Image (tube, helix red, strand yellow):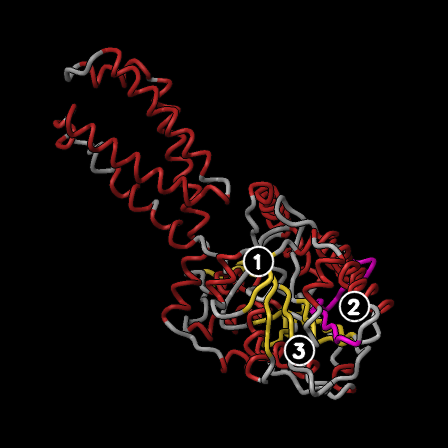
Amino acid sequence: MSNRKSAIVLGAYGFIGAACVKHLQHSGFHVTGVGRSQSAARQCFPELQWHFLDIASATTEDWSKIFEAADVVINASGALQDSAKDNLEAIHVQAIEHMCEALVNTDKLFIQISAAGVALDATTNFFRTKAKGDAIIRQQLEHAIILRPALVIGPQAYGGTALLRAASAMPLVGFKVFPKSQIQAIALDDLAQAVTHCALGKIPTGTTADLAEETPQTLWQLTKAIRAWQGFPQWRYAVTTPNWLLTVTSKLADALGGLRWRSPLRSTSIETLQNGITADTSIWQKAGGFRCKSLDETLRCLPSSTQERWFARLYLLLPLTIACLSLFWLASGIIGAIQFSDAQRVLTERGMDQTLSLLFVFAGSIADVTLGSLILFRRHTRLACLGMIAVTLGYLGAGTLWATDLWAAPLGPYVKTIPAMILALFPILLLEER
């Protein structure tokens, strides 16, 4: 095993996958990445060799070709919840079946990154499908290791860890969310190092082990620790968030999944936090694994900079900005349609032709409603924001020609559109997920 030098990482541009790539390369492995998005892959590792395909729909033949030259296969792919973009059964179960069929008669080492707490009777589909995939691996592959990390904390922040950072940076008042839930964490660096240990043959095949710090803390203690690490003073006031409010929020976040938004507030995340994230590290230690850093040690090893504080503060402002822009443009279009004659009169009184003014107001209302709706769809948000900027410039240009006097109007109808146009730049710059 120690002579293995070629590794394939599935989900190589993801939070965990990217860290595994770097550790494996540092240990002398030639690494190949597998992923769905070419743009995300090239941005993360432009020099890496890549295979691009949809992991959920890849066949056994696809995997046989991809795995052919590999000594080690690391599966760091996965999804949190079913949505318009993700199918957990396909990603966590069917894909595993095809991978195992491609590897069953080989001596290639397969390392599965699962999650602490998975069980066939778990309360969430994420844990149930992960458990099914793990069971298939144990049944079919002799040369396999399953690692089950607890809450992973690293220099980057995605999903639940991004939400924790944002919650920790809330001004004035701290919100206690499931304050008694027990949480164990693991440093991203420790998880990637554990994967490398397995790839180097330092952990026996057939091992299924949880990975985490030794001592848990409550979710409230975790939140306060992150806030202290960020450099913010501790809150003077704390409010316990009622469970019903979290349930309503999670249902709304689930609904937004149909628009391809993968919010960390979805019901799987909320239920997981409520149940707690704990692990039994004894198997890992008996298998020859190292001691994982505690939460305090993990945070001390991570930089806490101005950029970190900016991210934490801006994270929750992004959805608020999108909601405000949507309401602003929808209201503009709907009001324009309701008060069609009044809007048309503003133009005809200043010399515009009757027919041209009718077309101008009608097109403006349609454009406003369209852009206000499109921004809510994740795949169209950036395009909608660009459209808002372009339409605003068009409004200002046409208005300057036909109704120049409105620049000096007491309520500033032109001037007020400029901040709204600048606000549309915000989602364009911050929509990036990976």
Dot 2 alpha-carbon crowd within 10 angstroms: few under 14, some 14 to 19, many 20 or more:
many
Residue named by callout 2: 103
Does residue 236 appear to the left or right of 426 in the view shown?
right
Residue type (three-letter) at the residue carrying disc 3:
Val
Q: Is residue 120 above or below residue 378?
A: below
- Which amino acid type is shown beneath numbered disc 2? Leu
Relative to 213, is 389 on the left or the right? left
Task: Examine the rendering and report whether any part of residue 238 can be seen.
Answer: no
Q: Of the residues shown, which amino acid type is indicated by label 1? A: Thr
Instruction: Residue at the far top: name it.
Output: 354
Prevalent SS, magenta region: loop
Q: Is residue 332 visible?
A: yes
Decide which of tag 3 and tag 1 comes sooner along the chain: 3
**Residue beneath label 3, please?**
195
CA distance separating discs 1 and 2: 50 Å
View extreme (right): residue: 139
Which range is magenta? 107-122
Q: Name the residue under label 1.
A: 240
Q: Is residue 118 magenta?
A: yes
